[in-house]
Image: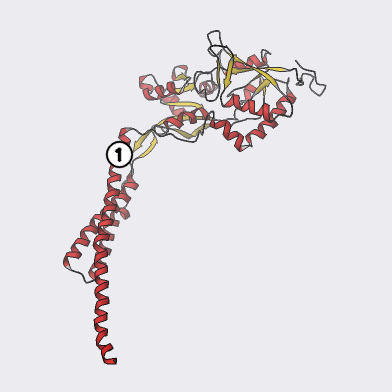
Amino acid sequence: MGQQAGNNNNNNQKITNSTRLRIVVPVKDGFTEFVDVKRDPTTKELISRGFAIDMFKAIVNSAMPYTVLFDFYPYERPNGSMNGTYDDMLRAVSSGDYDAAVGDISIRYFRTEMVDFTMAYSETGVSMLVPLRLKPGKTGTLFLRRLPQALIGAVVGEIAAIKRTRLVTVLCILILVVLTTCLGAIMISLQIAPKRTPLIDQHINDFIRNGKNVGYQTGSFVHNVLTQRGFSESQLKPYSAVEQLLDLLSKGSAQGGVDAAFDETPFLKLFLTQYCNAYTLLPSAALHGDGFGFAFRKETFTDLVRDISIATLKVTNNEVQLREIKDRTIGDLDSCRLDLTADEAIDSGPSMWILIAGIIGIVALMFIVCPVVISKTNYTIAKGRLISLPSLSLKS
């Protein structure tokens, strides 16, 4: 395909202007934000896009010191489905069917025996996704329970120290009772408000011991990780799209679904951008991962792998370019588009009315106190003027 290099590795092929790399890409039914490969129904031309594809194109087209020509080939069966697992795809690269593989391919130690990986272009890892539930908050502390009474006592003492009419005093006390009660209720509600906590707070071994089902993405190496941990095949349920994962989690193990899902963190974060109000990741269940990388036939394109790794650093350190790629593919994986249910909207009702009552109490108090203060001030000024009049007349 290219000129042989005479360096320490006789198999190291040089890339020339006539070299066209045969690059295989995975075919995915879901999570196509990372890799989306399809053919135009009219022209039959292959259309490849997604975060992994766009990253590779950006690295090769804008950061490499020389031109790299390539063609994408989907790793598919005649019916258009994925032709096996990601490991099968990498074996096809290792056997020489293709020069390289581009996609959301995790760098794993056992895979380095088949292919040479470039530097990772994206961080990854394996995490556990579990449902959330509303957990009642703790009862209010003694300080919060006594706060309204303390406020009432302090304010009543101030009122008693000031000479006012009985009616004004009674009205002020009533308003202050409402105000301090609302204030106390707000503070206690903040303390004891229901909090969302993981429905299942278990270790991986607890799922194995209790026979609970867990999910994994079709074709992922995570399947092998779970079986190595001790899961039986009957406990493992595959999914290939966000909708399938949501359906499995909604059913639970009792109805043939799953109680948790294990997958590479970027995929689960993509799921959470839509359903973060009902599910969460458990950091304690995170497993080590070395990131997504591009794979090349082992000991064949050593110089190219090195140059692409350097070019990868240029792109990943260019915040503007990286953000543009993410915005048009996977978006912000740390964002959350909350879709609150009707029950959650109802739960927020009491706090809203408590807040409104507190505001009304403050306004009412101002309407009562301000005129009294103004009247008292005017009376004091007028009295002072009357007292000063005789002295002025004597001086004159």
- Can the viewer see residue 114 in this picture? yes
**Residue, disc 1:** 347
**Residue 96 or residue 210, whichever sits in front:** 96
Residue 269 coordinates in the image, percent (x, y): 49, 31
Which residue is most to the top? 78
Residue 338 coordinates in the image, percent (x, y): 40, 34
Of the 4 image quadrants, the one containing the N terminus is top right
**Residue 277 or residue 376, whichever sits in front:** 376
Q: Judge whether 172 appears above or below 73 on screen.
A: below
Which residue is most to the bottom? 395
Which residue is most to the right? 6
7 with respect to 210 (left or right): right
Q: Residue at x 75, y 17 (%)?
A: 18
**Residue 119 or residue 353, whichever sits in front:** 353
Query: Is the residue marked by circle 1 packed among few (<14), some (14-19), or many (20+) residues within 10 Å?
Result: few
Name the amino acid type tagged 1. Answer: Asp
Q: Judge whether 14 appears above or below 387 on screen.
A: above
Which residue is most to the left? 166
Q: Judge whether 153 appears above or below 287 on screen.
A: below
Residue 155 coordinates in the image, percent (x, y): 27, 64
Colouring used for the render: secondary structure
306 with respect to 208 (left or right): right
> Considering the numbered disc 1 on the image, is that residue within a helix, a strand or a loop?
helix
Q: Residue at x 64, y 28 (%)?
A: 58
- Can the viewer see residue 123 in this picture? no
281 with respect to 255 (left or right): right
Q: Quadrant of residue 317?
A: top right
Of the 4 image quadrants, the one containing the C terminus is bottom left
Q: Judge whether 45 appears above or below 131 on screen.
A: above
Q: Residue at x 38, y 22 (%)?
A: 253
Q: Quadrant of residue 341?
A: top left
